[in-house]
Amino acid sequence: MTEPEVEYGAVVEMAPGLRRVVANNPGKFTYRGTGTYIVGQGRVAIVDPGPDDADHIEAVLAAVADEQVEALLVTHTHRDHSPASQAVAEATGAPSYGFGPHPPADDDDGKSEERGDLHFVPDAAVIHGDVVKGPGWSFECLYTPGHISNHIAYRWREASGVFTGDHIMGWSTTIVPPPDGNMTDYMASLRLLAEATHDRVYWPTHGPPVTEPQTLVEALYAHRLDRERQITECLASGPQTIAEMVKVMYADVAPELHEPASRSVLAHLIAMVGDGRVGTDDEVTAESVYYSQ
């Protein structure tokens, strides 16, 4: 799915009672940029306040200047989602909600938007099934690990829709980067959403709304199974490294995306080595040689 060019900092109505402000941080992980959502009127909730970008923070605060912010809902702690929480909380007094601080296992190389916000700690830690309520709105917390182990999606119950963060995006498949990203968890989280047939729309943090959510979830699940099939086919011709497999599996993808793709392939291989479908004589790493069992 694609989305027209956006006007950064503009407040755009996405649905009744729902507005979005997009940060000027486009990129290979963020598409047009981080979409910060404002739910409700008068007394509102903000989903994914966004990056530590002064212009974006100013635009979000301007959008709610005459309103009371009741809650800041953070899907996870990558740097394009949570850092603005601190400034918005200081300006509004709103408490932040999230699964927890950035996981120590996440590999923070400090080089991309996908890396971690090491400073965020939610005022209120939530787990699967918790409900965050405000005047006229309520959110059911959905623990959806895979992309990162502290990922929470938020079901806006009054609208039968889900803010999916990076678990499901409106423009691309989700990267599952080890060591913290986990393909087995990701697949289970997809099934969790697939079984919720009453959800009518997803609002990802990146990309346009998803108006046929179950169709997309099933397609994403099938896509991951197909990647496993491709790995099996690659290894049928003999032992290979991830780099060798990625050249074949992602031949139709821009070369600059091969590095993030290799991380998802590694996540698949961790699962496949774990259940005995694939073998390696070394530890399961990006440089190891893999073979069919």
Image: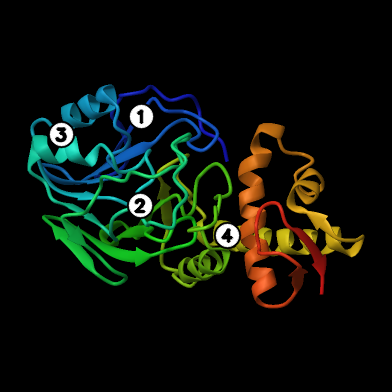
Neighbor class of circle 4 (other Cα within 10 Å; few <14, some 14-19, many 20+) is: few
Rendering quarter of residue 152: bottom left
Pointer 1 with pointer 2, Cβ within 8 A: no
State the SS at label 4.
helix
Q: Disc 3 or 2, which lies upstream in sequence?
A: 3
Identified at 52% across, 71% down, the residue is 188
Q: How many marks?
A: 4
Neighbor class of circle 2 (other Cα within 10 Å; few <14, some 14-19, many 20+) is: many
Q: Amino acid at mark 3?
A: Val
Q: Which residue is mark 2?
A: 76
* Measured Cα–Cα span from mark 4 to mark 3: 34 Å
Q: Residue furthest front?
A: 282
* Measured Cα–Cα span from mark 1 to mark 3: 16 Å
State the SS at label 1.
loop
Q: Disc 1 or 2, which lies upstream in sequence?
A: 1
Q: Disc 2 or 4, which lies upstream in sequence?
A: 2
Q: Which residue is mark 4?
A: 215
Q: Which residue is mark 3?
A: 64
